[in-house]
Amino acid sequence: MATNTFLVSFGMIGLRIIETYGLNTRSFTLRLDVPTSTVQNNRARLSADFADAGFMSAMTLISDPAFALRAAECWHPSDLQALGYAWLSSGSLHTALRRLERYICILAGRAALSCTDKEAGICLIYDTGRGNTPLGHTMADFGLSLIIAMCRTNLRGPLRLHSVHLKRPRPVDPAPYERFFASEVTFGADHDSFVLPWSVVNRPLPTGNAEMAQVCDDILVGELAKISGSDLVHRCRRFLIENVASGEPSEERLAEAMAMSRRSLQRKLAERGQSYRSILDRIRHDLARKYLAIPDKSLTEIAFLLGFSEQTSFARAFKRWQGLAPSDYRNLPHGQLDQEC
């Protein structure tokens, strides 16, 4: 779910990068015509157009084509506000990355994350929302380097990546990328992504704190509602979450709740790359993994909580989502860690 704004405190990371190249940040923000009072309010939000203009301006002022990788050196958890502290409190990188996937729109406007379980590990795809363009390439450098730095902070040490793929064409000098990622980098790829091995993402983190993570999650849910309450996909998710335990909410009921015809709902969701079924499946999949991490919840109870009429229907759906039965998933280390914090 993308929004058209970004958090000012998140933008401060970019300004610190500017400073490392000897540029005056005040002059830089004035050049962008960013209101001074807004820059001084870390909880304020700015149009994503300011982010685009800022990156484009930096690309003309800085000769280093890999400058955005310095986001790794210029961030602090407070720049991410509640999400930064929820990240630090996560019990594993798996739970941390899932949190980032869910709440990144609070920080980064049009950007989106997708975390997919692969045989080699968890694959994180970062979509800047700017396409396969020089601006998109630079923003991908910024986003991926920041996420890698966040992972390294939680691990308190080196991070071994399975693979790295970038959409940007192979640069004249690929060394800054190979040095930063400490991995062979494939350029000209279809997606900006990296894969973390299961042995890394499932490792219990020394900073894990379930109570703190829950407090931060409660704050993040409120923030998400504030910035995306008018977004159709978010409103559909909210309605389905509130009603799924009463049985599968039909597409007709959802359309009625959104005050539109079923056909209009289908068209508007399709424009956003979504559908009634894809949203409902994602909600059920996410909730199923949460419930499976609670030992005293039976599979029958979980099936009813997800709106299935019987346990066998739930089992078939979960195997389609995850590739294995709920009982088998419950016994896997990453299944237990998914909702540890």
Image (cartoon, rainbow, N blue to C red):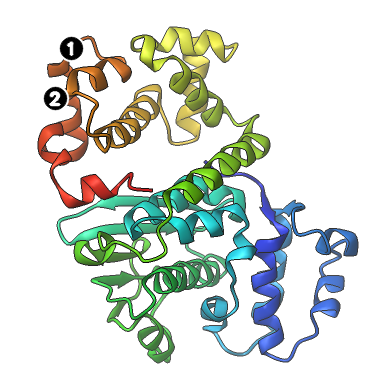
Amino acid, disc 1: Glu
Amino acid, disc 2: Arg
Residue for badge 1: 310
Report the front residue among 188 and 319. 319
Q: Residues within 10 Å of mark 2 (few under 14, many from 20)?
A: some
Place of residue 331 in the rendered image (x, y in percent of width and height, measured from the top left):
13, 43
Place of residue 262 in the rendered image (x, y in percent of width and height, measured from the top left):
47, 11
Say left or right for 277 vs 12: left
Name the N-terminal-most of marks 2 and 1.
1
The relative height of residue 68 versus residue 282 in the rendered view (above or below) is below
**Residue appearing at x 17%, y 39% in the figure:** 330
Residue for badge 2: 316
Query: Residue 248, labelled with which disc?
Result: none
The relative height of residue 305 versus residue 49 in the rendered view (above or below) is above
Place of residue 187 in the rendered image (x, y in percent of width and height, measured from the top left):
34, 75
The relative height of residue 274 versus residue 298 in the rendered view (above or below) is below
Q: Quadrant of residue 227?
A: top right
Report the front residue among 143 and 74. 74
Say left or right for 295 vs 113: left
Q: Secondary structure at mark 1?
A: loop
Q: How many marks?
A: 2
**Residue appearing at x 42%, y 49% in the figure:** 210
Q: Quadrant of residue 52?
A: bottom right
Mark 2 to mark 1 CA distance (whole Å): 11 Å
Q: Residues within 10 Å of mark 1 (few under 14, many from 20)?
A: some
Report the front residue among 151 and 231. 151
The reply to whether the C-beta atoms of the residues labelled 2 and 1 are less than 8 Å apart is no
**Residue appearing at x 14%, y 24% in the figure:** 316
**Residue appearing at x 24%, y 26% in the figure:** 297
Place of residue 182 in the rendered image (x, y in percent of width and height, measured from the top left):
32, 84
